[in-house]
Amino acid sequence: MESWLFEIDYCKNDVVETLNNLHEWMKPEKVKKGLMNLMDKAYIQREPFGVSLIIGAWNYPVQLTIMPLIGALAAGNCVVIKPSEVSPATADALEQVLPKYLDNDCIKVINGGVPETTSLLAERFDFIFYTGSTPVGRIVMQAATKYLTPVCLELGGKSPVYVDRNCDLTTVANRILWGKTCNSGQICIAPDYVMCQKDIQDELVSKLKESIAMFYPEGIEKSSDYCRIVNDRHFQRLKKLVDGSKNIAIRGPMDEKDNFMGPVVVTDVTPDDITMQDEIFGPVLPIMPVKDADAAVDYINNREKPLAMYVFSNNKETVENFANNTSSGSLCVNDVLMQAGLSSLPFGGVGNSGTGNYHGKFSFETFSHRRSVLLKGLKMETVNGLRYPPFTDKKLSTITWLATKKLKKVGLSSFLPYFIFGTIIAVVIKMIGLDKILSSFK
Ligand code: NAD
């Protein structure tokens, strides 16, 4: 079900949305004109960058290569795709399937690991779209500087969750657990760690236990709905986090031979703990008690900007506190991951969690250059000639009058024109009579 929803269906829906709307997205976008350009045409034209390089990551090996591909092709680019070598079966499938069904003059799939990606990055591309870790994002951006190639970097980081005391913790636990066990927590926007007040921590843990029992009634080891850690290296990395943690409140079963790791919840975590250093990217959930929402906001603001942020609260002020006083790629209130399901929202990070965004129309925009176009005629030389020397005070004052922008008035006076217009209409109706006006339209 997870593969179908997050890999296959996700991409199919994006294709359908793109096919349904591309003719609109492609249209030249008319822009406002000033007095100087009243007789001209001005618009924004979307044009392809040229040849784009898409470097995919392993955790959703179909989605993370096909979704950018949809935007790149829709915008008119040719594409070189480099799937992740960490998910070799999907990488092979993409190499075999894409050339079979898509235009080989436009698309090439190149498989390989770090040396191949390094070679690709030494080539000149017109756009680079990279999904993966922040450290490799830096390598990609550095390579891009050689030819000043524009980039979109879809990176990661620690996505925090704040749980307020006034919430229904059963629902909160279900939603957090779902986000942390989908793909075994190997999701860039997975809830990375939870902050809450100390006095609700124990109840949250017992609700998480109930959620585990509800999701996996036969026991998680026997469930066919729980996926494995991608490889031994990542399993060992996660195991180190568990082994290095003190207060393990929930210890899911582990099977090293199978890269199987059940959900692990660690309580009373402090900022120095091993689980609070790097992105977890697995089914380990640290809970860090904080004094209040302000302390959580401060903690977030003292660190790199997260890819996603989650706030569970029924209190409008608490939600606004996070919305107005923090920054992140996305913010989802009272749920996790679901913001990524809405293609009308851009998907991407900010600062260390990435630059640029995609999904739906945003993919088309990301892979398009916005070219400014001004179409003028060769007439109207009296007005156009105002800018030519010899300069005079009269020319200057005329151009200034035509080109100067006026600050919009705010406050009651800005409604004055509407008020005068409304009064005139009311007086006219009163004098002529509404019946007469309406009958004149018949
Ligand atoms: P990965 O190992 O699959 O690497 C991603 C790509 O980078 C691969 O194609 C790989 O070949 C290439 N690569 C790796 N090392 C390289 C190097 N030294 N030089 C050049 N290319 C190199 O994936 P990963 O980095 O382990 O992915 C996990 C990270 O990706 C997490 O941080 C996660 O949050 C992030 N991620 C982000 C998104 C997003 O949309 N923002 C989605 C998925 C994953």
Image: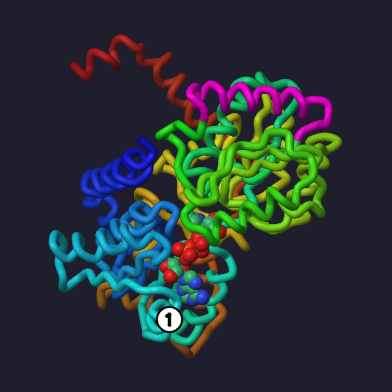
In the picture, residue 97 is in which quadrant? Answer: bottom left
Magenta stretch containing residue 203, yes or no?
A: yes
Residue displayed at 59% across by 49% down: 408
Magenta stretch containing residue 365, yes or no?
A: no
**Viewport quadrant of the C terminus:** top left
Whole-percent x and y of residue 344? 41, 42
Mark 1 is surrounded, within 10 Å at the Cα level, by few (under 14), some (14 to 19) or many (20 or more) other residues, namely: few
Whole-percent x and y of residue 375? 29, 70
In the image, 32 versus 442, the foreground residue is 32
Amino acid type, mark 1:
Pro
* Tag 1 residue: 115
Q: Secondary structure at mark 1?
A: helix
234 relative to 78, above or below: above
Whole-percent x and y of residue 397? 55, 72
In the image, 53 versus 191, the foreground residue is 191
428 relative to 31, above or below: above
Say whether residue 63 is left or right of residue 394.
left
The secondary structure making up most of the magenta span is: helix
Residue span colored magenta: 196-219
